[in-house]
Image: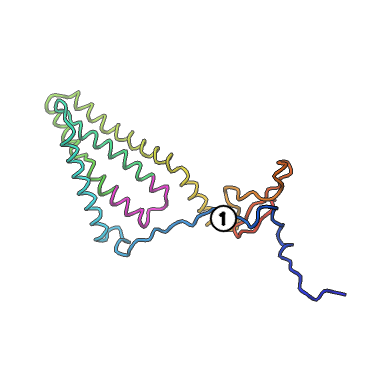
Amino acid sequence: MTDSQPRDTRDAASPPAAPGHGDPAPSRVAVPSRLPVPPRFAHPFSPAVLALVFAGGVLGALSRWALGEAIPAPGGWPLATLLVNLAGALALGALLETLARRGPDVGRRRLVRLTVGTGFLGAFTTYSTLAVDGARLLSAGRAGDGAWYLALSLLGGAAATLAGVAGAAWLHREDRRGLAAEAHVAAHPRAPHPSGGHVLGGTSGDPQNVTPRREGPSGAQEDPP
């Protein structure tokens, strides 16, 4: 006598879950945020974006002026300009590396780059004053001071930028891995997660008897090849 009821073959299509694990864990790959912005900020040369850059520039120039007034110039040596340029180079390197690790240059990330990087830090640092100060020292017969000032400004600025990039890369070292994983999943939706997926199955009592099974993109458990 045959059974007329349809048989459920779902369990036969995939191996049973390991005891104690319950339902498969959700995917660890987060959907990247698009960081939407209002339409008036969509174009980098729109009046709204230019206004943000202008506002950032005003604040940066005022900050540089305030530091120039507060920091003394020992022996007429332009210490304030040197420190301002070194601090700006450090901050700009850290800012750009942080934004690059967070995602593509779109939406709010682009607004931050334009407002803080181009506007504030662009006006905060000053290579025109650097050139004027260097020429003034050289014309006053202080060639040694002028050479040291220019060397510290240029080489120190490059070193400060690299330090900012390195510091931001260390602080946000996990962001690049997450972006690479998201790109891998987007390009290969049916491939295993590059981090190896969730290890499921087997018994926890004997590590030698553990049979790793990865969770696929759809949530189904997959046996290793």
The residue wearing badge 1 is 27
- Relative side of 220 to 55, left or right: right
Tell whether position 99 is magenta: yes
Residue found 33% across the figure and 63% down from its top: 38
Magenta-highlighted stretch: main secondary structure? helix
| Relative height, residue 202 to residue 5 (above, below) | above
Q: State the residue in front, 142 or 48.
A: 48
Q: State the residue in front, 13 or 186.
A: 13
- Relative side of 90 to 7, left or right: left
| Relative height, residue 93 to residue 72 (above, below) | below
What percent of the width, then of the height, locates residue 50?
Answer: 24, 56
Quarter of the figure with residue 153: top left
Residue found 48% across the figure and 44% down from its top: 174
Task: Identify residue type, mark 1.
Answer: Ser
Residue found 35% across the figure and 61% down from its top: 37
Q: Which residues are magenta?
A: 98-116
* Label 1 crowd bin: few (<14), some (14–19), many (20+), radius 10 Å: some
**Residue found at the far left of this picture:** 140
Q: State the residue in front, 80 or 131.
A: 80
Q: How is the image coloured?
A: rainbow
Tell whether position 17 is magenta: no
> Disc count in the image?
1
What percent of the width, then of the height, locates residue 90?
Answer: 32, 38
Residue found 28% across the figure and 51% down from its top: 115
What percent of the width, then of the height, locates residue 185?
Answer: 54, 55
- Element assignment for label 1: loop
